Image: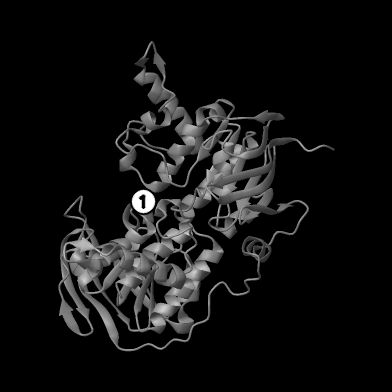
Amino acid sequence: MEEDYILQAKGVIKKFGNIAALKRVDLNVRRGEVHVLCGENGAGKSTLMNIISGVYPYGEYEGQLFYEGEECKFKSIRESESRGIAIIHQQLALIPQLSIAENIFAGNENSTRGVIDWGLTNRRAKEVMERVGLREDPETLVQDIGVGKQQLVEICKAISKDVKLLILDEPTAALTDEESDKLLELIKVFQKEGITSILITHKLREISRVCNSITILRDGETIVTWDANKDEITEDHIVKAMVGREMTNRFPPRESHRGDKMFEIRNWNVYSPIDASKQILKDINIYVRKGEVLGIAGLMGAGRTELAMSVFGKSYGTNISGELYKEGKQIRINDVADAIKQKIAYVSEDRHAYGAVANLSITKNITLPSLKKYVHGISIDENEETAAANRCKEMLHIKCRDVDQAISNLSGGNQQKVILSKWVLCDSDVLILDEPTRGIDVGAKYEIYEIVNELVAKGKSVIFISSDMPEILGMCDRVYVLNEGEVAGELEGQDITQVNTMKIIMSKGA
């Protein structure tokens, strides 16, 4: 029986200058299925989806696209949307200052003769919101809801346009496990309603939850497509196809050689910057040794990021009190410049907002915190800057055309390496890594882990914040468990298990 394909890509080639991002890629998506697209960062997944949705218009690529049996030559996103194709990018395209309803119907307003019917807009928004389980007032500003709910607003935008093919690019990257599970269930509901989905994800556990078919891309080429009903699809198979080699151990081995205390936080209290009466962190006491990877675990909202940012130059919070010690001596950090002087670094969980300057080159991003090194008189020695950036490129295996390339043109994993590079170049003693592997593939994760191991081997201290429990188990020498803004417990060595971590969380207040 002939397959009923809603979408087919045949021999698609896309080049950026002399670099081929896609090399004769084929993709076959059956009507009504959930088709997972996997591959390392830079494999070409987002590029292919941008071609399908018209972001890269016909004429800027080679090959053919067929949608519902007809060849497509989309010139814009509007053209693909008119045929029922909607794409939800990893970086949400919402306007924070507008309401939920305004965002849902932006560019698709409910209007008569140019006058928007706000009553109808809010009623229709409410109907669509109920369909995805978003229980908010449609007049609520998007900036006043969490990331999980913002993701649902993006989905509301898509289904308000009678979508037939929904493309989701890393939709759960910034969500909690609970929010991710709800979103995956929603994709399955859409499938029952006849909507086809293409899901790009790096989270291997999600694949078994929703996958009907899976296509693996590597280095811009189609490696394999598997059918969940016919083929055995294991995590090991997926990883091998993605990276082109066996990865029997997801975490590189490391010998632990811990020394004296490097950095200590004593009696740390932080209040909300929005409501100064609300205490976010309560009497935090933790320390990290030289040559140690210290994990900070806990549920979302436990205060992990707030702790990191408040310590790093009081970047978060108000009414902050407590003491900081480095190598036994009390230090004062009142702003980010103070933190950098004390050789304390922070890699944010949101690399786009806090980690990278998108319009600057790789070189400028790497040298920004240590720019004084390259100033001679009244000018900057750009040759020295470039040489330093190239050393980081080689040391951290950053995949790029050259270091003059804009950081925004790199894959997520390589952007993260650039952000790490700038703190390595500063010769930071303490590196606070907040979700350092979020949204990057297994191969790039392994390289980040190797960099962490190299840092602690040199006597540096790493504070490793992660929501991924296998990552905490695989990387950390010792772990503090945070719960509701307090240190609920401490685990070390063989005692660091998922069961023990959850026991600590559940026992608080019991």
Q: In the rendering, at what x and y percent does residue 52 appear?
A: 59, 37
Q: What secondary structure is found at the residue carrying circle 1?
A: loop
The foreground one among 501 and 247 is 247
Does residue 276 appear in this view?
A: yes
- Count of number-bearing discs: 1
Q: Is residue 369 left or right of residue 189?
A: left
75 or 335, nearer to the observer = 75
Q: Quadrant of residue 301?
A: bottom left
Up-down relation of residue 218 to residue 453 (above or below)? above
Quarter of the N terminus within the rendering = top right
Q: Position of residue 8 (x, y in %)?
A: 69, 38
Vertical position of residue 285 compared to residue 28: above or below: below
Q: Which residue is mark 1?
A: 358
Residue drawn at the location 40% of the way across and 69% of the way down: 392
Looking at the image, which residue is at 45% across and 38% down? 154
Compared to residue 10, the image places residue 124 above or below, namely above
Q: Is residue 279 left or right of residue 201?
A: left
Left or right of 128? Residue 29 is right
- Residue type at tag 1: Ala
Could you tell me residue 495's position as x and y percent?
46, 81
What residue is at 57 percent from the left and 49 percent from the top? 45
Corner quadrant of residue 467:
bottom left
As rendered, which of 449 and 302 lies closer to the eye? 449
Q: Quadrant of residue 277?
A: bottom left
Residue for point 65% across, 46% down: 35
Question: Horizontal and vertical percent for residue 4?
Answer: 75, 35
Q: Quadrant of the C terminus?
A: bottom left
